[in-house]
Amino acid sequence: MDTSIKILIVDDFATMRRILKNILKQLGFKNLVEADDGTTAWEILQEQEIDLIISDWNMPKMTGLELLKKARADAKYKAAPFLMVTAEAQKQNVIEAVQAGVSNYVVKPFTAEAISDKLEKILK
Amino acid sequence: MDVTLINPFINATINVLETMAFVTVTPGKPYGKKDNTAGGDVTGVLGLTGVANGTIAVSFEEKCILTVVSNMFGEDMDTLNDDIADAVGELTNMISGQARRELDEVGRVFKAAIPSVITGKNHTIRHYTDGPKIAIPFKTDGGNFTIEVCFER
């Protein structure tokens, strides 16, 4: 995996952003940016060049699904890797995310290995 | 209250704590809870709507949640602060998510609200319905916590 890429972590819980940052740093990723909701994430996506988006689903202001749909409608992020990390894994949620173009899906609770495996798949 | 709603929350609690915080969790015997006083010092409360309306609450003793969050972050946490409150909110969220997945598999679909967190000695828990409250105590090596499940009659 190319560990020099810039990753945007989006979650309304600071706890989850911290856990994900710890895991990503252990995997060698250093270029990490974070946002606490979809609206802030979208502003960052417009201002910066992000290579991978890791987003929660259930957030105030703009959900992860809405963020995914906006990204897929934007030429810059149409094909960008987008990993959904969420507690929302009921069948209907997974179908909606796949239809919206998610690259992969990690269900909370998760292990560091689960994150690593999914990143290997979407960044290869 | 439909008692078959309880087991998914017990299973989810064990899995979330063991996966995210690497602690061994042992559930005790569920009991009917009459008062509103929290069993712990920090409590996450989350509303659920769907085939039944209700709330779940996850209430940690101080020592227990400090151990749990220290393990989650890989660094020592020694004070109940905003970081701990945020972690309790996310743990409550994950427990709800996993339990709802198990219930979804048998056709019982629930939606969850965003959790709120209450901190302080002897605080009270306000469930959103007046149905019976079932409490399940849990033990870990780092201390105790309790979950409460309350659905409308």
Image: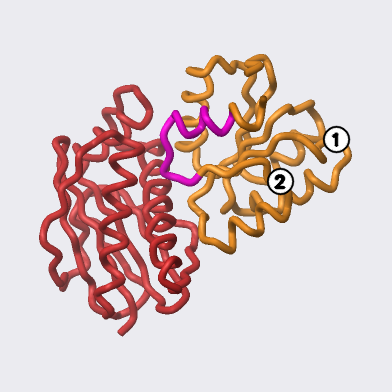
Chain colours: A orange, B red
Three-letter amino acid code of the residue under disc 2: Thr
Residue shown at the point (66%, 16%) measured from the top left: A2
Residue shown at the point (34%, 45%) measured from the top left: B16
Residue occupied by mark 2: A39
Q: Which residues are magenta?
A: A107-119
Q: Nearer the viewer, residue A70 or A123?
A: A123
Spatial distance from mark 2 to mark 1, Cα to Cα? 17 Å
Question: Is residue A26 covered in magenta?
Answer: no
Q: Position of residue A108 (x, y in %)?
A: 45, 45
Q: Are marks 2 and 1 in contact (CB under 8 Å)?
A: no
In the displayed structure, would residue B102 be above or below residue A51? Answer: below
Considering only order in the chain, which callout, 1 or 2, is on the residue closer to the N terminus? 2
Residue occupied by mark 1: A76
Q: In terms of secondary structure, where does tag 1 sit?
A: helix
Q: Say left or right for B11 vs A122.
A: left
Question: Is residue A117 covered in magenta?
Answer: yes
